[in-house]
Amino acid sequence: MRGMETPTELAERLIRRITEQGPISVSDYMAAANQVYYASHDPLGREGDFITSPEVSQMFGELIGVWIADLWRRAGAPDIDYVELGPGRGTLAGDALRAMATQALRPGVHFVETSPVLRALQAKHVPDAIWHDDIASLPSDKPLIIVANEFFDALPYSQHIKTIWGWRERMVTHGMDGFVPIPGNTPTEPSVPAYLHDATPGSIYESSPSGLAIASALGRRIAKQGGALLAIDYGHEDYNAGDTLQALNAHAYADVFANPGANDLTAHVDFSALAKAGKSAGTRIAGPVSQGYFLGTMGIAARAAALALRYPDRLEEIGSAHRRLTSEEEMGALFRVLAMVAPKWPEPAGF
Protein backbone atom coordinates (compact mmCIF):
# COMPACT_ATOMS: atom_id res chain seq x y z
CA MET A 1 0.00 0.00 0.00
CA ARG A 2 1.55 3.27 -1.18
CA GLY A 3 0.41 5.29 1.84
CA MET A 4 2.44 3.10 4.23
CA GLU A 5 5.83 3.73 2.63
CA THR A 6 8.51 5.36 4.78
CA PRO A 7 9.95 8.84 4.21
CA THR A 8 13.14 7.21 2.91
CA GLU A 9 11.16 5.12 0.42
CA LEU A 10 9.17 8.19 -0.62
CA ALA A 11 12.34 10.19 -1.25
CA GLU A 12 13.71 7.37 -3.40
CA ARG A 13 10.45 7.18 -5.37
CA LEU A 14 10.38 10.94 -5.96
CA ILE A 15 14.01 10.94 -7.08
CA ARG A 16 13.26 8.15 -9.59
CA ARG A 17 10.23 10.05 -10.87
CA ILE A 18 12.18 13.30 -11.27
CA THR A 19 15.07 11.48 -12.98
CA GLU A 20 12.74 9.74 -15.43
CA GLN A 21 10.10 12.44 -16.02
CA GLY A 22 11.60 15.75 -14.93
CA PRO A 23 10.71 18.15 -12.08
CA ILE A 24 7.39 17.74 -10.25
CA SER A 25 5.06 20.50 -9.10
CA VAL A 26 5.10 21.81 -5.54
CA SER A 27 1.50 20.58 -5.35
CA ASP A 28 2.49 17.01 -6.24
CA TYR A 29 5.45 17.14 -3.85
CA MET A 30 3.25 18.36 -0.99
CA ALA A 31 0.55 15.76 -1.70
CA ALA A 32 3.04 12.89 -1.70
CA ALA A 33 4.86 14.12 1.40
CA ASN A 34 1.71 14.63 3.48
CA GLN A 35 0.22 11.31 2.42
CA VAL A 36 3.22 9.47 3.86
CA TYR A 37 3.47 11.80 6.86
CA TYR A 38 -0.09 11.31 8.07
CA ALA A 39 -0.27 7.62 7.21
CA SER A 40 2.86 6.70 9.14
CA HIS A 41 2.41 8.19 12.62
CA ASP A 42 0.44 10.30 15.08
CA PRO A 43 1.71 13.87 14.57
CA LEU A 44 -0.19 15.48 17.44
CA GLY A 45 0.67 16.37 21.02
CA ARG A 46 3.83 17.14 22.93
CA GLU A 47 5.56 14.04 21.59
CA GLY A 48 4.52 14.84 18.02
CA ASP A 49 5.13 17.79 15.73
CA PHE A 50 2.30 20.19 16.57
CA ILE A 51 -0.69 20.75 18.86
CA THR A 52 -4.12 21.68 17.53
CA SER A 53 -6.77 23.64 19.43
CA PRO A 54 -8.76 20.55 20.51
CA GLU A 55 -5.60 19.16 22.11
CA VAL A 56 -5.01 22.42 23.99
CA SER A 57 -8.27 22.18 25.94
CA GLN A 58 -11.63 20.43 26.04
CA MET A 59 -13.19 23.90 25.92
CA PHE A 60 -12.54 24.19 22.20
CA GLY A 61 -14.47 21.06 21.19
CA GLU A 62 -17.20 21.72 23.74
CA LEU A 63 -17.89 25.16 22.28
CA ILE A 64 -17.99 23.70 18.77
CA GLY A 65 -20.60 21.26 20.09
CA VAL A 66 -22.58 24.13 21.61
CA TRP A 67 -22.40 25.99 18.29
CA ILE A 68 -23.75 22.96 16.43
CA ALA A 69 -26.53 22.27 18.95
CA ASP A 70 -27.63 25.92 18.89
CA LEU A 71 -27.80 26.04 15.09
CA TRP A 72 -29.57 22.66 14.94
CA ARG A 73 -32.21 23.68 17.49
CA ARG A 74 -32.97 26.99 15.73
CA ALA A 75 -33.20 25.11 12.41
CA GLY A 76 -36.07 23.05 13.87
CA ALA A 77 -34.08 20.13 15.28
CA PRO A 78 -33.93 18.07 12.06
CA ASP A 79 -32.27 14.66 11.75
CA ILE A 80 -28.62 15.52 10.98
CA ASP A 81 -25.23 13.89 10.70
CA TYR A 82 -22.00 15.26 12.15
CA VAL A 83 -19.08 15.17 9.72
CA GLU A 84 -15.47 15.99 10.53
CA LEU A 85 -12.76 16.39 7.91
CA GLY A 86 -9.34 15.23 9.07
CA PRO A 87 -10.41 14.67 12.69
CA GLY A 88 -6.95 14.15 14.18
CA ARG A 89 -7.18 11.89 17.22
CA GLY A 90 -10.96 12.37 17.48
CA THR A 91 -10.55 14.70 20.45
CA LEU A 92 -12.62 17.53 18.98
CA ALA A 93 -15.43 15.16 18.00
CA GLY A 94 -15.48 13.51 21.43
CA ASP A 95 -15.74 16.84 23.24
CA ALA A 96 -18.26 18.27 20.76
CA LEU A 97 -20.51 15.21 20.87
CA ARG A 98 -20.50 15.27 24.67
CA ALA A 99 -21.65 18.90 24.60
CA MET A 100 -24.29 18.14 21.96
CA ALA A 101 -25.69 15.31 24.06
CA THR A 102 -26.44 17.74 26.89
CA GLN A 103 -28.77 19.48 24.40
CA ALA A 104 -30.43 16.20 23.36
CA LEU A 105 -28.55 16.12 20.06
CA ARG A 106 -27.03 12.76 19.17
CA PRO A 107 -26.21 12.79 15.46
CA GLY A 108 -24.67 10.08 13.36
CA VAL A 109 -20.91 10.59 13.06
CA HIS A 110 -18.85 10.47 9.86
CA PHE A 111 -15.10 10.98 9.63
CA VAL A 112 -13.22 11.72 6.41
CA GLU A 113 -9.82 10.23 7.17
CA THR A 114 -7.33 8.12 5.20
CA SER A 115 -4.62 7.53 7.82
CA PRO A 116 -4.89 4.06 9.42
CA VAL A 117 -2.88 5.30 12.41
CA LEU A 118 -5.27 8.19 13.07
CA ARG A 119 -8.37 6.08 12.38
CA ALA A 120 -7.33 3.75 15.18
CA LEU A 121 -6.94 6.69 17.58
CA GLN A 122 -10.27 8.20 16.49
CA ALA A 123 -12.03 4.89 17.17
CA LYS A 124 -11.02 5.15 20.82
CA HIS A 125 -12.83 8.49 21.19
CA VAL A 126 -15.77 7.81 18.87
CA PRO A 127 -16.16 4.05 18.34
CA ASP A 128 -19.47 4.39 16.48
CA ALA A 129 -18.09 6.65 13.77
CA ILE A 130 -18.30 5.74 10.09
CA TRP A 131 -15.09 6.39 8.15
CA HIS A 132 -14.76 7.68 4.58
CA ASP A 133 -11.74 7.98 2.30
CA ASP A 134 -13.17 11.14 0.70
CA ILE A 135 -16.28 13.33 0.71
CA ALA A 136 -18.00 11.52 -2.17
CA SER A 137 -19.46 8.80 0.06
CA LEU A 138 -20.89 11.11 2.74
CA PRO A 139 -24.65 10.79 3.35
CA SER A 140 -26.79 12.60 0.77
CA ASP A 141 -30.21 12.20 2.38
CA LYS A 142 -30.08 14.61 5.33
CA PRO A 143 -28.52 17.87 6.54
CA LEU A 144 -24.82 17.72 7.40
CA ILE A 145 -22.96 19.76 10.00
CA ILE A 146 -19.35 19.62 8.80
CA VAL A 147 -16.35 20.67 10.88
CA ALA A 148 -12.97 21.27 9.26
CA ASN A 149 -10.39 22.21 11.89
CA GLU A 150 -6.88 22.56 10.43
CA PHE A 151 -7.95 20.60 7.37
CA PHE A 152 -7.65 22.96 4.41
CA ASP A 153 -4.11 24.07 5.33
CA ALA A 154 -2.68 20.59 4.73
CA LEU A 155 -4.20 20.04 1.28
CA PRO A 156 -1.86 20.40 -1.72
CA TYR A 157 -0.95 23.97 -2.69
CA SER A 158 0.24 25.08 -6.10
CA GLN A 159 2.87 27.80 -6.24
CA HIS A 160 3.82 30.14 -9.08
CA ILE A 161 6.93 32.33 -9.15
CA LYS A 162 7.48 35.52 -11.14
CA THR A 163 10.64 35.34 -13.25
CA ILE A 164 12.19 37.82 -15.68
CA TRP A 165 10.41 35.82 -18.41
CA GLY A 166 7.01 35.98 -16.66
CA TRP A 167 5.10 33.72 -14.29
CA ARG A 168 6.08 30.05 -14.07
CA GLU A 169 4.81 27.21 -11.89
CA ARG A 170 7.20 26.45 -9.05
CA MET A 171 8.57 22.94 -9.48
CA VAL A 172 10.74 20.61 -7.39
CA THR A 173 13.85 18.92 -8.72
CA HIS A 174 16.65 16.92 -7.11
CA GLY A 175 20.40 17.37 -7.28
CA MET A 176 23.57 17.69 -5.22
CA ASP A 177 21.71 19.81 -2.64
CA GLY A 178 18.76 17.43 -2.38
CA PHE A 179 15.23 18.51 -3.27
CA VAL A 180 15.10 22.16 -4.36
CA PRO A 181 12.44 24.41 -5.91
CA ILE A 182 12.95 25.83 -9.41
CA PRO A 183 10.78 27.75 -11.89
CA GLY A 184 9.13 25.60 -14.53
CA ASN A 185 9.40 26.22 -18.27
CA THR A 186 5.75 26.80 -19.15
CA PRO A 187 4.17 30.28 -18.77
CA THR A 188 1.37 30.26 -16.17
CA GLU A 189 -0.11 33.76 -16.40
CA PRO A 190 -3.68 32.33 -16.71
CA SER A 191 -3.27 30.76 -13.24
CA VAL A 192 -2.22 34.04 -11.61
CA PRO A 193 -4.56 37.02 -11.04
CA ALA A 194 -4.15 39.74 -13.67
CA TYR A 195 -3.23 42.35 -11.06
CA LEU A 196 -0.09 40.34 -10.25
CA HIS A 197 1.15 40.01 -13.83
CA ASP A 198 3.55 42.94 -13.33
CA ALA A 199 4.75 41.83 -9.89
CA THR A 200 8.43 42.01 -8.95
CA PRO A 201 10.51 39.00 -10.07
CA GLY A 202 10.81 36.54 -7.19
CA SER A 203 7.20 37.09 -6.09
CA ILE A 204 5.28 33.92 -5.28
CA TYR A 205 1.56 33.31 -5.71
CA GLU A 206 -0.06 30.22 -4.21
CA SER A 207 -3.49 28.62 -4.29
CA SER A 208 -5.13 25.34 -3.38
CA PRO A 209 -7.27 24.13 -6.29
CA SER A 210 -8.03 20.86 -4.51
CA GLY A 211 -9.07 22.68 -1.33
CA LEU A 212 -11.39 25.02 -3.22
CA ALA A 213 -12.85 22.07 -5.14
CA ILE A 214 -13.68 20.33 -1.85
CA ALA A 215 -15.17 23.54 -0.44
CA SER A 216 -17.31 23.96 -3.56
CA ALA A 217 -18.50 20.35 -3.50
CA LEU A 218 -19.41 20.53 0.18
CA GLY A 219 -21.07 23.89 -0.37
CA ARG A 220 -23.32 22.37 -3.03
CA ARG A 221 -24.14 19.51 -0.64
CA ILE A 222 -25.10 21.96 2.11
CA ALA A 223 -27.15 24.14 -0.22
CA LYS A 224 -29.10 21.08 -1.37
CA GLN A 225 -29.31 18.99 1.82
CA GLY A 226 -29.23 21.66 4.53
CA GLY A 227 -26.75 22.15 7.34
CA ALA A 228 -23.48 24.05 7.58
CA LEU A 229 -19.72 23.82 7.34
CA LEU A 230 -17.48 25.36 10.01
CA ALA A 231 -13.88 25.89 8.87
CA ILE A 232 -11.21 26.83 11.42
CA ASP A 233 -7.63 27.27 10.31
CA TYR A 234 -4.68 29.60 10.28
CA GLY A 235 -4.78 31.87 7.29
CA HIS A 236 -5.54 35.26 5.86
CA GLU A 237 -8.09 37.32 3.94
CA ASP A 238 -7.58 39.24 0.71
CA TYR A 239 -4.42 37.29 -0.11
CA ASN A 240 -2.21 39.12 -2.56
CA ALA A 241 1.07 37.22 -2.92
CA GLY A 242 3.64 35.55 -0.70
CA ASP A 243 5.11 32.18 0.20
CA THR A 244 3.38 30.66 3.25
CA LEU A 245 4.37 27.03 2.66
CA GLN A 246 6.01 25.74 5.83
CA ALA A 247 7.21 22.53 7.46
CA LEU A 248 6.96 21.54 11.13
CA ASN A 249 8.88 18.87 12.97
CA ALA A 250 8.97 18.46 16.76
CA HIS A 251 7.23 21.84 17.22
CA ALA A 252 9.92 23.68 15.26
CA TYR A 253 10.11 24.94 11.69
CA ALA A 254 11.95 22.70 9.26
CA ASP A 255 13.09 22.88 5.63
CA VAL A 256 10.06 22.35 3.38
CA PHE A 257 12.16 20.52 0.80
CA ALA A 258 14.14 18.29 3.17
CA ASN A 259 13.02 14.81 4.27
CA PRO A 260 9.64 14.64 2.46
CA GLY A 261 7.18 12.58 4.46
CA ALA A 262 8.93 13.27 7.79
CA ASN A 263 7.56 16.80 8.30
CA ASP A 264 4.09 18.31 8.38
CA LEU A 265 3.66 20.55 5.30
CA THR A 266 1.02 23.29 5.43
CA ALA A 267 0.19 26.68 3.94
CA HIS A 268 -2.02 29.54 5.09
CA VAL A 269 -5.65 29.24 4.03
CA ASP A 270 -7.03 31.99 1.81
CA PHE A 271 -10.35 32.60 3.56
CA SER A 272 -11.54 35.07 0.94
CA ALA A 273 -11.18 32.36 -1.73
CA LEU A 274 -12.86 29.83 0.56
CA ALA A 275 -15.80 32.21 1.12
CA LYS A 276 -16.10 32.84 -2.62
CA ALA A 277 -16.20 29.09 -3.30
CA GLY A 278 -18.93 28.57 -0.71
CA LYS A 279 -20.99 31.50 -1.95
CA SER A 280 -20.74 30.36 -5.58
CA ALA A 281 -21.96 26.94 -4.45
CA GLY A 282 -25.15 28.49 -3.05
CA THR A 283 -24.44 28.83 0.66
CA ARG A 284 -24.56 31.89 2.89
CA ILE A 285 -21.22 32.92 4.37
CA ALA A 286 -20.60 34.02 7.96
CA GLY A 287 -17.19 35.42 8.80
CA PRO A 288 -14.35 34.99 8.65
CA VAL A 289 -13.64 36.22 12.17
CA SER A 290 -10.70 35.56 14.45
CA GLN A 291 -10.71 32.41 16.58
CA GLY A 292 -10.41 34.61 19.66
CA TYR A 293 -13.56 36.54 18.71
CA PHE A 294 -15.49 33.38 17.84
CA LEU A 295 -14.63 31.53 21.04
CA GLY A 296 -15.21 34.68 23.08
CA THR A 297 -18.66 35.12 21.58
CA MET A 298 -19.44 31.46 22.21
CA GLY A 299 -18.67 31.87 25.94
CA ILE A 300 -15.18 30.48 26.49
CA ALA A 301 -14.58 32.82 29.46
CA ALA A 302 -17.63 31.46 31.27
CA ARG A 303 -16.65 27.88 30.42
CA ALA A 304 -13.11 28.45 31.72
CA ALA A 305 -14.51 29.91 34.96
CA ALA A 306 -16.81 26.91 35.40
CA LEU A 307 -13.94 24.47 34.86
CA ALA A 308 -11.77 26.40 37.31
CA LEU A 309 -14.45 26.10 39.99
CA ARG A 310 -14.80 22.39 39.33
CA TYR A 311 -11.07 21.71 39.18
CA PRO A 312 -9.32 24.27 41.42
CA ASP A 313 -6.08 22.29 41.23
CA ARG A 314 -6.00 22.93 37.44
CA LEU A 315 -6.51 26.69 37.65
CA GLU A 316 -3.20 27.59 36.00
CA GLU A 317 -3.63 24.98 33.26
CA ILE A 318 -7.15 26.19 32.42
CA GLY A 319 -6.08 29.84 32.37
CA SER A 320 -3.12 29.04 30.16
CA ALA A 321 -5.32 27.12 27.70
CA HIS A 322 -7.83 29.99 27.62
CA ARG A 323 -5.05 32.45 26.73
CA ARG A 324 -3.49 30.18 24.15
CA LEU A 325 -6.77 29.69 22.31
CA THR A 326 -7.90 33.32 22.36
CA SER A 327 -4.93 35.67 22.79
CA GLU A 328 -3.89 37.75 19.78
CA GLU A 329 -0.28 36.86 20.59
CA GLU A 330 -1.02 33.14 20.33
CA MET A 331 -3.78 31.32 18.38
CA GLY A 332 -6.52 33.91 18.77
CA ALA A 333 -5.68 36.18 15.84
CA LEU A 334 -3.78 33.92 13.41
CA PHE A 335 -6.59 31.37 13.31
CA ARG A 336 -9.75 32.34 11.44
CA VAL A 337 -13.28 30.92 11.55
CA LEU A 338 -15.72 30.83 8.63
CA ALA A 339 -19.12 29.20 8.22
CA MET A 340 -21.03 28.14 5.12
CA VAL A 341 -24.74 27.78 5.89
CA ALA A 342 -27.67 26.41 3.90
CA PRO A 343 -29.84 29.21 2.45
CA LYS A 344 -32.92 28.40 4.54
CA TRP A 345 -31.04 27.75 7.80
CA PRO A 346 -30.75 30.41 10.54
CA GLU A 347 -27.79 32.70 11.04
CA PRO A 348 -25.04 30.90 13.00
CA ALA A 349 -23.84 32.11 16.39
CA GLY A 350 -20.33 33.37 16.97
CA PHE A 351 -20.02 35.81 14.07
Image (spheres, helix red, strand yellow):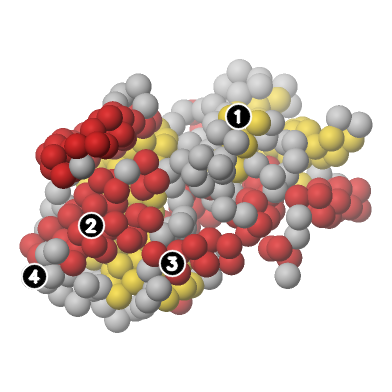
Sort mark 1 into few (<14), some (14-19) or many (20+) by Cα contacts within 10 Å: few
Sequence-first tag of 4 and 3: 4
The residue lying furthest to the front in this view is 313
Which residue occupies 57% across, 22% down? 199
- Determine which residue is flagged by label 4: 76
Q: Is residue 33 above or below residue 199?
A: below
- What element does badge 1 sit on? strand
Question: Nearer the viewer's eye, disc 1 or disc 4?
Answer: 1
Q: Find residue 95 and report its image quarter.
A: bottom left
Q: CA distance from mark 3 to mark 2?
A: 19 Å
Which residue occupies 51% across, 66% down? 119
- Determine which residue is flagged by label 3: 124
Res. 253 mark: 1
Quadrant the C terminus occupies: top left
Q: Find residue 229 and report its image quarter.
A: bottom left
Sort mark 4 into few (<14), some (14-19) or many (20+) by Cα contacts within 10 Å: few
Sort mark 3 into few (<14), some (14-19) or many (20+) by Cα contacts within 10 Å: few
Q: CA distance from mark 3 to mark 1?
A: 30 Å
Sequence-first tag of 3 and 1: 3
The amino acid type, in three-letter code, at marker 3 is Lys
Q: CA distance from mark 4 to mark 3?
A: 32 Å
The amino acid type, in three-letter code, at marker 2 is Gly
x, y percentage for residue 243?
A: 57, 29
- What element does badge 2 sit on? helix
Asked whether disc 1 touches disc 4, contact meaning CB atoms under 8 Å apart, the reply is no
The amino acid type, in three-letter code, at marker 4 is Gly
Q: CA distance from mark 2 to mark 4?
A: 17 Å
- Determine which residue is flagged by label 2: 65
Q: Is residue 123 above or below residue 193?
A: below
